[in-house]
Image: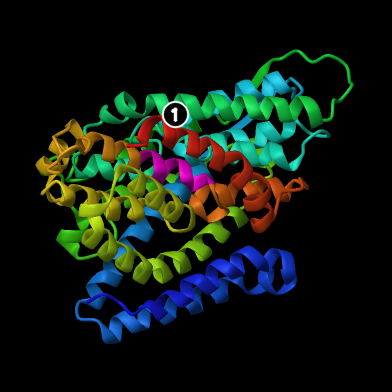
Amino acid sequence: MVPPVWLVAPFVVLLVMIATGPLLYPRFWEHHYRKVSMILGSVVAVWYALMVDGGWRLLGHTLEEYLSFIALIASLFIVSGGILIRVERRGSPLVNTLLLFFGAVLSNFVGTTGASMLLIRPYLRMNEGRIKPFHVVFFIFIISNIGGGLTPVGDPPLFLGYLRGVPFFWVIQHLWIPWLMTVVALCLIFMAFDTLTGKPVEEKPLSGRIELTGSRNFVWLAIIIISIFLDPAVIPGFPSLQRLLHVPFGIREVIMALVALVAYRTADRVALKGNEFNFEPIREVAFLFIGIFATMLPALELIGAWAHSHAAEFTVSKFFWSTGFLSGVLDNAPTYLNFLAGATGKFGLDAGNVEHVRRFALGMPSPVSGDVASGVYLAAISVASVFFGALTYIGNAPNFMVKNIAAQTGTKVPDFIEYVYKYSIPVLLPLFAALWFFLFNF
């Protein structure tokens, strides 16, 4: 049963309050955002529990997704907080641009969350005394989002696609052109911004040496990345705690939680102090996103039903823009899955069948005469779900954490509305339109 449209209201209210709270009523929002998120999420959860056949199953699945999400980002946040990177060099347009490009590449090996948490603090320190809001914004654009578009490790939608049957190296083979075009364009725009408006800092020359404290945490980081693949869909026959014990988490999440606990208890205290580590950024994400996961459930069901019913008439362009804009305001992972299901259905395939998804990814002719092959649809959906996560602070979890960490250092960061109208709309949308025109305008 498709939920009533009015049930999307709690999600809209939460989205509006996230956008306006820090700006219009900051005192109330700072003290009560947890309650607001939980109450609005509870409204939707109670409706599903009492009014929908199978509602408890849907809520259980949503809880599983949330626990997987928070286990990954919390463990990466905690482990990276124990790694102190000091660069004996002042930020400059060239140095900053090189760091952003390096971070974009790194995102594909440790995820956008891991790269963001590792690099945001040294980036802020390097630019102390000259940092402006656009420095933080472009960090979010490049490292926290678009950079992770080359491997399934980079961003959650691509990993879910991998679990569903998309070959691991399909991503880099088909997305490297839009990735390179967008990352290079953003780096050049950033360099121009930094050259024209960045404040130079005059001081004695620095050595350029890189100092690393807490390097043993890289071992914990590697364990977290490896644990991502401990899934029955990746390793046939791998045990599933959800099925064995009927609990809303798995071996992967247990490993991440244990690693985070041990890493924090054994972390180098100098590194934690140097990073001014505290739990507020991840606490804010945890509370806001539990409300987002719950309230967006009816929105995702409505979108899924709409995508299935309209898939036959959807072009590559419609899949690109629909997936993109919805990924900017909803969690991009389930949005990706909904449109993947619609696109595979267009080709007479089942997104729940690993072999069908593999055939869809490798390319098959369209049943519609004159239409394009299936791989182009998958590329459009993949690019849009990852790249458009940079449109808003809620588009991807690292966005919120980077914003919070920067704000704690006294850096002026744009509020939700300013971020959208001053940066993402004028900078990102023209780039995404160019991508669409040259690569997906069929």
**Where 402 sits versus 68, above or below?**
above
| Depicted 227 relative to depicted 32: above or below | above
Q: What residue lies at 72% left-to-right and 23% top-to-bottom?
A: 93
Name the dominant secondary structure of the magenta segment. helix
Position of residue 410 measured from the top left corner of the image (x, y, whole percent): 78, 48
* 386 within the magenta span: yes
Res 226 → quadrant: top left
Q: How many marks?
A: 1
Horizontal and vertical percent position of residue 138: 63, 37
Q: Which residues are magenta?
A: 381-390
Measuring 69% from the left and 64% from the top, which residue is drawn there?
Answer: 22
Crowding near the residue tagged with mark 1, few <14, some 14–19, many ≥20 C-alpha atoms within 10 Å:
many
Q: Label 1 is placed on what type of residue?
A: Trp
In front here: 246 or 62?
Answer: 62
Q: Is residue 126 visible?
A: no
Picture residue at 11% right of the left edge, 48% below the top: 349
Q: Looking at this rendering, what residue extends furthest in the bottom direction?
A: 50
Q: Residue at x 50, y 71 (%)?
A: 12
* Residue tagged 1: 179
The residue nearer to you, when weighing 299 against 140, is 299
Q: Position of residue 286 (x, y in %)?
A: 50, 60
